[in-house]
Amino acid sequence: KKFDLSLDAVVKYFACGFLLTTAMAVVFEMLFTIAANILLDLVVFPFLPYFVPEYILYMNDVVIFDYLMLTYPTVFIAFYFVEAFLSAAFVEEVVKYFGYWMVIHPDLMEAEDIASLLSSFSRRSSTTSAASSPSTDASTATQTNQEEKEVETGDDDHDDGDIQLETQGVESLPQHQPQLQSLRSLNSVGNGITVAMVAVALGFACCENLVYIFVYTPPNLELQLTTLFSRSIFPVHPLCAAIQSIGVCRRDLEKEKHIQLGRIILPSVILHGTFDFSLMVMTFLNMYNILSNGGDPAAEMDLEEEFSMDLFLEIMPSLLVALGVVIVGWIYFVVGSRLQKARLDALDIEEGAALISDASIV
């Protein structure tokens, strides 16, 4: 979609995702972690003696944790559900949306907004010139007023079919930029919105992957490459951003005012949360199975062990579940985007018919 969004815009949206959205996600997830720890200190730990035998309470935290995992697995699954959908999915989808919202670029501005913005620049330039040249005669002032009037009404001296940009400064842009913007179809603008939101998500995912590789993964090249590969084959962040763009287009292009932030991010939160929750549950079930057989999860699931076929077979169910979730999300996006394309085409036809009707009346 290189004709729907400029490279300049893509770079800006990607940079916003890489820097700003990642920083916001870290802050909000840290706040969630602090709140969860406070909740554990106030609600869970004081009641541990009622749920854990006394002889286990005097052992180390690992033994207590393993006992709780074997005795109350549903509690752990419920905790993973909250962590997946609230701490991860909800927070990250919200910050990605606001990452898109924070960038204002002419490629995705409406014609009226561009005309208003450039008109204000023109007035400011004219005011500055008048202040620096107090000896300006009455004819120059009259000419300036006439130019401002043309900016406000959108009139110019060119023919309707001639959309040739002048090179005499900002004063000429307000007359033509809105015309160029209005030539774009709604589908073109919608494609630009999708590309912009995906660019934000790619910037966010790129920074997140670097953190996972160089912070959470042990300093082993093979393990780092494995982590990079496993996190790259499932494009959850870009897919969720594309799904969000459907809601943004419904609100901004189809003018469905009842579509607000909640409805925009809800499908992506469900997809993202389901993806994370499925991986967490599969990992938990693997640990639970090891504990049930008298093994040590910390030793058998050591990240620093060499990658082998047995290890690959152990994580295969998790990969298949994650792949299934991604496929369902991709189908949802394809169906939704095609239906939206048909609706936007219909709106373009209606708008074109209205313009032809107005021209014939004139």
Image (tube, grey):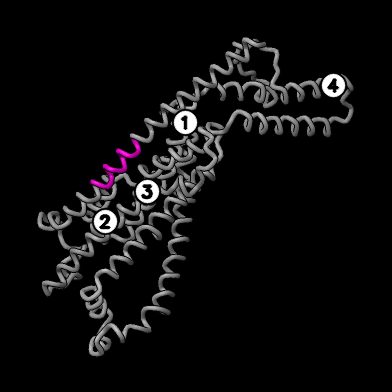
Report x, y in % for residue 142.
Answer: 84, 21
Label drawn at residue 205: 3
Q: Residues within 10 Å of mark 3 (few under 14, many from 20)?
A: many
Secondary element at tag 4: helix
Q: Position of residue 218 (x, y in %)?
A: 26, 62
Residue under the point 87% across and 19% down: 139
Numbered disc 1: secondary structure: loop
Residue 100 to residue 54: above or below = above
Residue 123, image quadrant:
top right
Q: Residue at x 36, y 78 (%)?
A: 44
- Marked residue nearer the N-terminal end (1 or 2): 1
* Disc marking residue 142: 4
Give the residue type that dot 2 points to.
Ser
Residue bounds of the magenta highlight:
324-334
Q: Nearer the viewer, mark 2 or mark 3?
A: 2
Earlier in the chain: of badge 4 and badge 1, it is 1
| Amino acid bearing label 4 | Thr
Count of marks overlaid on the render: 4
Q: Which comes before the other along the chain, label 1 or label 3?
A: 1
Location of residue 306 with respect to 52 vertically, above or below: above
Q: Amino acid at mark 1?
A: Leu
